[in-house]
Image (cartoon, helix red, strand yellow):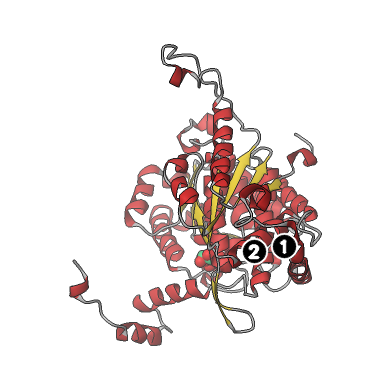
Amino acid sequence: MAKNSELRLRFDFNNMMADFIGEKEGFTVEELNQSAKICQDAFDTVQKNRGTGMMGWSELPYNQDEVVTDIVATAKNVRENFKYFVVLGIGGSALGPIAVFQALKHLHYNDLSDEKRGGPKFYVEDNVDPERMNALFDVIEPEKTMFNVITKSGSTSETMSQYLIIWDMLKSKFGKDAKNHMIATTSENSGNLIKIAKEEGLKTFYIPDSVGGRFSELCPVGLLPAAVLGIDIKTMLAGAAYMDKLCATADYKKNPAMAFAILQYIAFNKGKNISVMMPYADSLRFMADWYCQLWAESLGKAVKKDGSPAFTGQTPVKSLGVTDQHSQVQLYTEGPFDKVVTFIAVDNYRSEVVIPNGCEQFPNVNFLCGHTMNELISTEMKATEYALCRKNRLNNTIYLPEVNEFTLGQFMFMLELATAYIGEMLGIDTYNQPGVEEGKNATYAMFGRKGYEEKRQELENAPKKKEEFIC
Ligand code: PA5
């Protein structure tokens, strides 16, 4: 394996600067230097709060030796005895596992033979679409399936309804042995799932109270599914710790997470309300989804910590290079000046494909021959960067030397830190999600959950939809 320094992520923000995209849109060094105090204050607050309140995530790279041992042993058992591993969860309890699976396993993993896969097939059920639930039953064999229900609150309707359906099926098939097919990952101290798990005798893993859903990939939420897939979770944590060390200063020139945060902050204050995440790698496409949740739920807030109005937060948008060059890039180059595009580039892809000779009589096709797809995808990213710069559009790039456990650990930790910094800059509570809770509560009320009578009344009194506005 390459040395840590060779696997270090690089954050290139040249194309945020006036030198490259012009004075009107681009930033100057003076402007960035003037933000030094904002960076320092955000850095100091994040440092001070590390490991406390809802900032337990910052210590996950360091304090999980015991649980990692348990996870590795449990994962070994699952790998040896089960053909399917199914996660039941949503939001922060699903997006990390999906993103890491896509990034580190074969891109057609579930289609491989048992021998080539070397571990269970993997599914994450992060919706309550009845068609999807029944579709799952069509592809798994219950006697060979381990389920992992993940919910910190233990009360999320989507996850608990999935749990009820699966548990009912397991009970009817296996009776008292149903417990051998379900692992629960939840809060140790609160919520329903821990009580249910204890009652049913399920194997459990705990989500620390100080770690919120969208910051939970590096705790058992993400580590157990990853380990079941044969992913080296210790190296992922080591990557996170490595990034943490790189970010040990408030100086944005040395701290990639701070550079990302302050640039987005300044851009946001200049009306760049949209943050596009555009990986040039299929393996990283769901990392963009993971980022979208992190950025949206953490920063989209109505009030500041002091109670004053905020109505803040950039809208994250997921894009995939090169695919979305043929769908979204027209808008990014010529539409409103309201975006920052972040490319994610990979220096060394894990495969190489040569474009063979052919079509000699058609020079406009033949020019591709002899090149590799690797060259093509990287060149297309540079070409898109260039096109954006020509149109004075803010863009920056996170380079991963390659996609592996160590670089992913760095990547995720960098963006978690950046989210924490910008949350402080915006003066908001990065870790709550009252907007999500409102929807959850409305669902409980409409389903007649005890304790939600008042909310139900409120909903019943809400204006009814009018036929005249439906055509
Ligand atoms: O980031 C968050 O806190 C949320 O997105 C949660 O992860 C999501 O709502 C699921 O919650 P829970 O894990 O309690 O089921």
Q: Is residue 246 above or below residue 8?
A: below
Q: From the viewer's perspective, is 381 left or right of 450?
A: right
Q: Quadrant of residue 303?
A: bottom right
**Marks 1 & 2, CB-CB < 8 Å contact:** yes
* Residue type, numbered disc 2: Ile
Question: Which residue is nearer to you in this view: 170 or 439?
Answer: 439
Question: Which residue is nearer to you in this view: 13 or 374?
Answer: 13
Judged by depth in the image, the label closer to the viewer, 1 or 2, is 1
* Residue type, numbered disc 1: Glu
Percent across and percent down for residue 153 are: 54, 70
Q: Is residue 459 above or below residue 330?
A: below
Q: From the viewer's perspective, is 142 left or right of 24?
A: left
Q: Crowdedness of circle 2 by 10 Å Cα count: few (<14), some, many (20+)?
A: some
Mark 1 C-beta to ligand 1 under 8 Å = no
- Give the residue at mark 1: 31
Q: Crowdedness of circle 1 by 10 Å Cα count: few (<14), some, many (20+)?
A: few
- Give the residue at mark 2: 266
Quadrant of image for the N terminus: top right
Percent across and percent down for residue 101 are: 55, 45
Residue at 49% across, 59% down: 89
The answer to whether any part of residue 146 appears in the image is no
Q: From the viewer's perspective, is 59 left or right of 323?
A: right
Lower sequence index among marks 1 and 2: 1
Quadrant of image for the C terminus: bottom left
Residue at 50% across, 16% down: 356
| Secondary structure of residue under mark 2 | helix
Question: Which residue is nearer to you in this view: 246 or 187?
Answer: 246
Residue at 68% across, 53% down: 70
